Image (cartoon, helix red, strand yellow):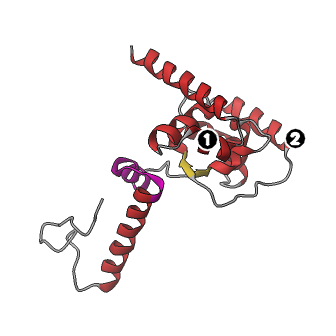
Amino acid sequence: MDFSKKRGINGDGFGLNTGNAEERFLVDIFSQITERLKQKYNYSDTELFKMWNSENSLLVPVSIFSGKLSPSEALTKFMKENCDLTYHEISELIGRDERGVWANYKRSIKKMPWPFEISDSIAVPVSIFVPGKSILESLIIYLKDAKKMRNNRIAKLLNKNPANIWTVHNRAKKKENKNES
């Protein structure tokens, strides 16, 4: 998405008035951000488009999944406490039953009554969590296939064994192949 090469109808880039310095500056910053996301974090043009144009552009830090909570508990706790979402909104975003979201949150606050300490880490869009796969399967599929990460790196991020990462990825791929048939 090199926005400097895109041209509007009048040839001045997005149809913007080239005399407006602020617009040129913002387009330049946007271009730099998208290039950085593509180079450093392996985002595709499609992922960037969805991220900038989606209501589900909520990003979830991967570091929340490395603690003692189950992936579904961690995701629910993060969305409830850090994003101030209701159980209904969370259930709609991740495609899970509202009662299950409520139960996951209640279990998470018993296990971890303090808030998450969010470290600088990779973030994933909430839209990757789909009903056909577990939270962990969705996360690993995204990190491995979309972000092109190796099992060892994913294992370090999630504080898990690399062999478990391979097993979960393999199981999720089998589910995808079964659903395609």
Residue 91 is drawn in which quadrant?
top right
| Residue 48 image offset from top left, x and y in percent | 39, 53
Ranked by sequence position, the earlier of labels 2 and 1 is: 2
Residue at left offset 17%, top offset 66%: 8
Q: Quadrant of residue 77?
A: top right
In the rendered view, tell whether residue 16 sits above or below residue 70. Answer: below
**Relative to residue 24, is residue 91 depicted above or below?**
above
The chief SS type of the magenta part is helix
Please name the residue that numbered disc 1 is placed on.
152
The magenta segment: 40-52
Is 42 magenta? The answer is yes
Amino acid carrying mark 2 in the image: Lys
Is disc 2 surrounded by few (<14), some (14 to 19) or many (20+) residues within 10 Å? few
Image-based side of 78 in relation to 35, left or right: right
**Going 44% across and 19% down the picture, which residue do you hit?**
177
**Callout 2 secondary element:** helix
In terms of secondary structure, where does tag 1 sit? helix
Residue 2's disc number:
none
